[in-house]
Amino acid sequence: GEDVEQSLFLSVREGDSSVINCTYTDSSSTYLYWYKQEPGAGLQLLTYIFSNMDMKQDQRLTVLLNKKDKHLSLRIADTQTGDSAIYFCAEKPSYIPTFGRGTSLIVHP
Amino acid sequence: DAGVTQSPTHLIKTRGQQVTLRCSPKSGHDTVSWYQQALGQGPQFIFQYYEEEERQRGNFPDRFSGHQFPNYSSELNVNALLLGDSALYLCASSPGTGAGNTIYFGEGSWLTVV
């Protein structure tokens, strides 16, 4: 995951918005992904964005892409305790995605 | 519609032994990839199978091998297990190998080597 960087932890209060940030290196990445991993489970695809888009919204999730700075963010509105998990950013410049180390989101009451 | 299924969910092996992990892809998917996820790390790509052949390989030794069957299911084999092989092994499937094809993951197989 050395090509994809994420902060390791984020702590928010229930009901607030969470913003998880990611930087990637390969400007040829056509798709960028966000996956969620709950304790002891596999990775669940949350959303993805095509590189010709700047923003994508899906219910409580908003993805922002800044291609110039190679920066991707995931905003979760009205964060709930069930959103507590590890969130992985992934770039996919060719056939194989490269993952970051993941950001642990902790939601407290 | 069943998603990606893996077996076994947990297993413990002794150093030097061999292990086989199994994966059935999501319905309609013909491409299977395997990843190793060590504790506190993101998934690391091991290899990808399409049309029963290994198409892409990550930076893993030859002790890691695989197979894909005509029904698209797949196995991951690891020989001469080391303590450092302890990890969550994730199988992922996609409809083809194209860059635009989204990858879906199974729940993983937890391997502990003692």
Image (spheres, rainbow, N blue to C red):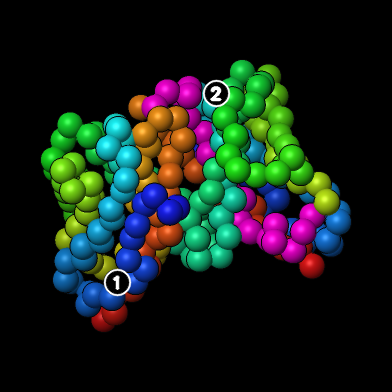
Report the front residue among A63 and A40: A63
Q: Secondary structure at mark 1?
A: strand
Above-or-below relation of A66 to B52? below
Above-or-below relation of B99 to A5? above
Few, some or many residues within 10 Å of mark 2 (<14, 14–19, 20+): many
Residue named by callout 1: A10
At 25% across and 61% down in the image, what residue appears?
A20
Report the front residue among A39 and B64: B64
Q: Mark 2 near mark 1, Cβ–Cβ under 8 Å?
A: no
At 24% across and 75% down in the image, what residue appears?
A12
* Residue B25: numbered disc: none
Q: Which residues are drawn in magenta? A: B81-99
Q: Is residue A43 visible?
A: yes
Q: Is residue B98 magenta?
A: yes
At 70% across and 44% down in the image, what residue appears?
B61
Residue lying furthest left: A54
